[in-house]
Image: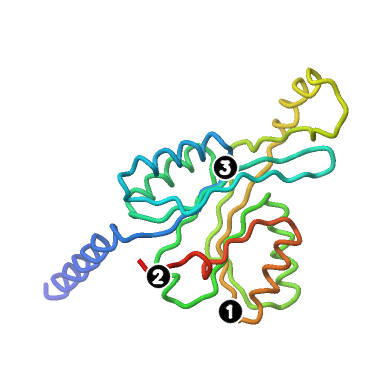
Amino acid sequence: MIEDNIRMLRQAARINQDDKSIDDDIWCIIAGNVDLIDDIAYKAIASKNTVKILFREHVSLSEGKLSKKFDFIMLYGNSRRIEEFGRISLSRGGAYIKVSHFYINEGSKLMVFVAPDDVVRDSVSTIEKLRIPFAILQESQTTGFIDVEINDDVKLPGFIKSALKPFYNANEVVLSTILISVENDEDVEKVQSIATSNKIFVIDFKDIITED
């Protein structure tokens, strides 16, 4: 009986702690096609200042005769609202990761990579081969389509380019978003260099965290 009461008190304490932290401000990164990110940006603007847009990026990566286009956005604000945005994003095929103050308080060197999945995996493999101590804390991949277009410098009539676009978009490009922690200060620049040389967009948390 006493043990049951203790167990109930512990469960109540955990629930109270969870409820207390549920409205904490957190960061998140959402990646996907332009329509999804347009909608997320609108919801953030309409959130009555509970969620702030830190930045938004339009990315176009050229590979041979094709351009892969996607958008991503970084938000900071009320965790309830951001969790809501996350559910919307995942239901529509976007990639979504959130970063709470727990990660920041651990004092880790945090970075986010956003790029096509094959490029992210190649870069992670290179970092590992160099024996740089790091960890992948979170990862998320898109399941929706990323726009793929024929480059403007390819000389084809416009109607042919339009006819080919559905074919290229049918070959889905998976976009990957990962949160990594680098153990040593001296390795941060090495990791950034590897990522940027592979055309990965890198977010270094030390550059975006400010005092509330």
Q: Residues within 10 Å of mark 2 (few under 14, many from 20)?
A: few
Q: Residue at x 41, y 64 (%)?
A: 100
Q: Where is residue 156 in the image (x, y as percent from the top left)?
A: 86, 24
Quadrant showing the N terminus: bottom left
Circle 3/circle 2 CB separation < 8 Å = no
Check disc 1 and report the residue beneath it: 183
Mark 2 sits on what residue?
102
Which badge, 3 or 2, is on the more N-terminal residue? 3
Location of residue 181 in the rendering, given as x and y in whole percent from the top left corner: 56, 71
Which residue in the structure is indicated by mark 3?
32
Say which residue appears at 34% left-offset and 48% top-offset.
Answer: 81
Mark 2 lies on a secondary structure that is: helix
* Placement of 170 over or under 116, stated as above or below: above
Q: Which amino acid does label 2 sit on?
A: Phe
Give the percent coordinates (x, y) of residue 65. Answer: 84, 38
**Which amino acid, mark 1?**
Glu
> Is 99 positioned to the left or the right of 167 in the image?
left
Number of numbered discs on residues: 3
Q: Nearer the viewer, residue 46 or 81?
A: 46
3D distance between C-alphas at marks 3 and 1: 29 Å
Callout 3: few (<14), some (14-19), or many (20+) C-alpha neighbours within 10 Å?
many
In the rendered structure, the answer to whether residue 146 lies left or right of residue 38 reads right
Real-space Cα separation, disc 1 to disc 2, in angstroms: 16 Å
Q: In which quarter of the image is the C terminus?
A: bottom left
Mark 1 surroundings within 10 Å by alpha-carbon count, few (fewer than 14), some (14 through 19), many (20 or more): some
* 112 with respect to 76 (left or right): right
Q: Quick one: label 3 or label 1, which is nearer the N terminus?
A: 3
Nearer-N-terminus badge (1/2):
2
